[in-house]
Image (spheres, helix red, strand yellow):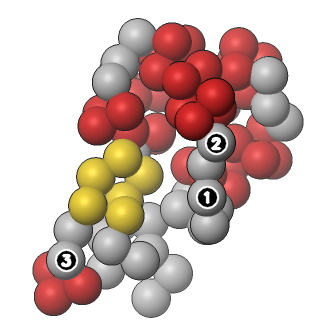
Amino acid sequence: MPIIVDIDVMLARRKMSVGELADRVGITPANLAVLKNGRAKAVRFTTLAALCEALQCQPGDLLRWTTEADGPGPHSDH
């Protein structure tokens, strides 16, 4: 998929664990892992907003687009 999820990058920058972020956002660590690993098919805007608030970032810091020609991203299942 050409959408790359960079939640792990922001977690590292903020020195925050997946569990702490999940608690702040109000989702389970398992659901956050699905999103973080690029396996989610969709994300609610309310969840995206909560992620941005907890990480003090913009949506573009968490999601980026790449062309299929660029090859699989770091979170690809290919």
Q: Amino acid at mark 1?
A: Ala
Work out whether 72 lies above or below 15.
Answer: below
Work out whether 8 lies above or below 51.
Answer: below
Q: Is residue 19 visible?
A: no
Which disc number belongs to residue 42? 1
Picture quadrant of residue 68: bottom left
Q: Nearer the viewer, mark 1 or mark 3?
A: 1
Q: CA distance from mark 1 to mark 2?
A: 7 Å
Q: Amino acid at mark 2?
A: Arg
Q: Residues within 10 Å of mark 2 (few under 14, many from 20)?
A: few
- Reading the image, the residue beneath label 3 is 67
Image quadrant in which the N terminus is located: bottom left
Residue 36, position as x, y percentages in the image: 56, 49
CB atoms at circles 3 and 2 under 8 Å apart? no
Residue 4, position as x, y percentages in the image: 36, 59
Q: Amino acid at mark 3?
A: Thr
Residue drawn 19% across and 77% down? Answer: 67
Q: Secondary structure at mark 2?
A: loop
Which disc number belongs to residue 22? none
- Give whichever of discs 3 and 2 has the lower sequence position: 2
Q: Residues within 10 Å of mark 3 (few under 14, many from 20)?
A: few
Q: Secondary structure at mark 1?
A: loop
- Give whichever of discs 1 and 3 has the lower sequence position: 1
CB atoms at circles 1 and 3 under 8 Å apart? no
- Reading the image, the residue beneath label 2 is 44
Residue 73, position as x, y percentages in the image: 31, 70
CB atoms at circles 1 and 2 under 8 Å apart? yes
